[in-house]
Image: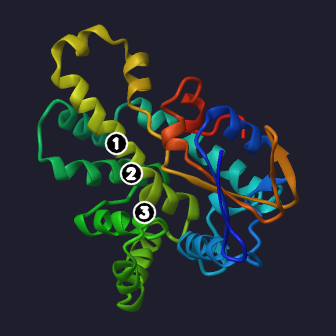
Amino acid sequence: MKRLKIPGVADIFKVNEPKEINALAQDPRVDREFDLQTCFFNWFLLKRSLSVLSVGNRHFPTMISRDSRQRKSDQEELWNQLNERIPFFRDGPDELDALANWVRGAGEDSEVGILAQQLLGRLFFPGFVATEESWAAAKLFVAAPRSWKMPTVCWWWLSGKFSRSKRLLAGMVDGNLSAMNAIGIAVHNLVKGIRRMRVLYTDSQTRFSLTPEEAAQECLFAPVSLYRQASAAGELNGCPFPRNALFIFEIAEASQKEGGRPLVFMDET
């Protein structure tokens, strides 16, 4: 765990070890109940992410406290909704055929994003249709909370480009925040996995030596990072942290280390 501390400016912990991430994720003092009454740099990172990952006054589930009753209710509803879609995907819809063909080498490299977005969108809305515009909006949407190209970020906001992208994605899924997260954020991890599938398939020796389960494990990718904040002072492995310290869980890196694969889906958290 690495700490960046500049008194009055920043107090940030970057965590990329699986055991440390798991310990902090289970710590009730470290949560998504974000307090913006904090030092400037912490405030900036949180404010930017909360602004991006919200519609109106509703935050995405990934930015809501674990104890939120609304979040738990929404999770149960999502669980039931997705379970109802299992038969549809078990039967092999056209979207899976299109992706399988892409993995086998058919189609342009740029098509995979639209195909993946189409697949995820139809988990929520049977009539969902991904387009070049919706995929471009998703690429901007995922970059907005993390990009350090500040002139570009400012232009996105001032020109209204980001707002238009968010409205487009929200309109395609009737403002469903879980669906927006799927087609705007999580879809990029799926695309990484599908690109990896294509690489594995191209090598005939690898293709025939891997079981489906082994291939699937090779093709799972975690988000780059997640934010958590300390609601009270504490300590981890002899390293104290103060209230309102910001934790950046670098789970993409951590998930590639020994014992880190469960972090792809933040299992048991």
Identify residue for label 3. 142
How packed mark 3 is, by other alpha carbons closer than 10 Å (few <14, some 14-19, many 20 or more), is some
Identify residue for label 2. 188
Q: Do the residues labelled 3 and 1 touch (CB within 8 Å)?
A: no
Which residue is at 28% across, 41% downward? 94
Which residue is at 25% across, 24% downward? 200
Q: Is residue 85 visible?
A: no
Identify residue for label 1. 192
How packed mark 2 is, by other alpha carbons closer than 10 Å (few <14, some 14-19, many 20 or more), is many
Q: Which residue lies furthest to the top in this view?
A: 209
Q: Are marks 3 and 2 in contact (CB under 8 Å)?
A: yes
Query: Of the numbered discs in the image, which one, if any, rests on residue 83?
Result: none
Residue 85 to residue 67: above or below: above
Give the residue type at disc 3: Val
Helix, strand or loop at label 3? It is: helix
Camera-nearest residue between 119 and 224? 224
Helix, strand or loop at label 1? It is: helix
Residue 258 to residue 44: above or below: above
Using residue 188 as the reference point, say whether residue 41 is left or right of it: right
Give the residue type at disc 1: Lys
Percent of width and height locating residue 134: 32, 66
Give the residue type at disc 2: His
